[in-house]
Amino acid sequence: MSLPIMPNKIALFSAKPYDKTYFEQFRHEFDCQVDYFEVPLTEQNVQLCQGGYDAVCVFVNDTVNQAVLSQLSEFGCNIVALRCAGFNNVDLQAAENLNIRVCRVPSYSPEAVAEHTVGLMLTLSRKFHKAYNRVKEDNFSLNGLLGFNLFKKTVGIIGTGKIGHATINILKGFGCNILAFDPTETPIDDVAYVSLETLYKQADIISLHCPLTPQTHHLINQDSLALMREGVMIVNTSRGGLIDTDAMIKGLKARKIGYLGLDVYEQEANLFFEDLSNEIIDDDVFQRLLTFPNVLITGHQGFFTQEALTAIAQTTLGNIQLLNNQQDCLNQIKPS
């Protein structure tokens, strides 16, 4: 008599109600048991993974360093499944040394992040957020709401992967002139690939769509800012570490940066995805950013659409099933 096949057992960290909704919707299709932990994965609570888990599922602000991976290996957990595209929070070399396989969701909904990016651009340029608050107070004055057209503006796209490409497609519809930089130049109609220096000098709007690596860390800094046009708009919906926040504050104070739109922040792990409305936030840099009238910050919600959450759950569970069955997984990532 053969023993019954046990379902894949997954520990999902940084779990929010919407994660549970979508993973519960699809887990039966992939024969999975999912235990949800609201806390982020850290060195201090990795002990939660002792329950015989085949995989841990993590998000952008979970810690998956060598210490955490060593503990996971001791517990017999040999799969780390990222339910996001970025993997800068995972020590890939340590994972490989410990025979822990790592997978991600490289493309859940490029259009979700692209549309949020352009939404930030439009809100900054046309001051929708300020107009909304005024009208709620019966103030219909247009003073202070003067905006500018995106039509014929030069937009510099740094990173032309799927999200960057989707952003370009939207901006073409506005009649923008597109400059792009990417180490891998994938030909795109009506897009001119240029050097970073040229992009910085010529773009009215700069939008970041690249991964966070040692090479891209603080890509936007005091030196790159000095090359940019006066009143430049900078939008980052990728990773907070791409921007030197202190340099941005100096640029805002000097009026070099005319508009700054952020969906990510370098120190967001202590802030984003939580309700801190009744707490005192002691991040002075973040609080300083909030004081500028030309800064718009959203809490890492660019991915947050029904379509994206569906794709994230299905792809993540599919990745785990493939790896647990020792099958090839196109979404597995290894150290470069």
Image: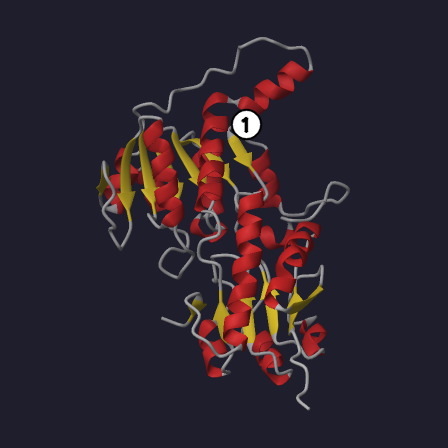
Which of 8 and 170 lies nearest the eye of the viewer?
8
Q: Indicate whether 41 appears above or below 111.
A: below
Instruction: Examine the image and state in which quarter residue 158 appears.
Output: top left
Residue 101 appears left or right of 202: right
Amino acid tagged 1: Pro
Residue 274 appears left or right of 93: right
**Residue at the spot 44% in from the left edge and 46% down from the top edge:** 110
Instruction: Examine the image and state in which quarter residue 214 appears.
Output: bottom left
Looking at the image, what colour scheme do you see? secondary structure
Q: Indicate whether 148 appears above or below 22.
A: above
Which of 207 and 81 lies nearest the eye of the viewer?
81
State the residue position of label 1.
293
Q: Position of residue 325 (x, y in %)?
A: 52, 77
Q: Position of residue 164 (x, y in %)?
A: 37, 45
Q: Position of residue 81 (x, y in %)?
A: 54, 67
- Location of the N terminus (image quadrant): bottom right
Which of 213 and 317 lies nearest the eye of the viewer?
317
Residue that protrudes farthest toward the front in the picture:
1
**How many numbered circles does the render carry?**
1
Residue that protrudes farthest toward the bottom in the picture:
1
Label 1, residues with CA under 10 Å away: few <14, some 14-19, many ≥20: few
Mark 1: which secondary structure?
Answer: loop
Can residue 267 be seen here?
no
Q: Position of residue 133 (x, y in %)?
A: 64, 20
- Location of the C terminus (image quadrant): bottom left
Residue that protrudes farthest toward the right in the picture:
278
Q: Indicate whether 143 appears above or below 4.
A: above
**Residue at the spot 45% in from the left edge and 24% down from the top edge:** 125
Can residue 63 be seen here?
yes
**Residue at the spot 60% in from the left edge and 54% down from the top edge:** 269
Residue 140 appears left or right of 156: right
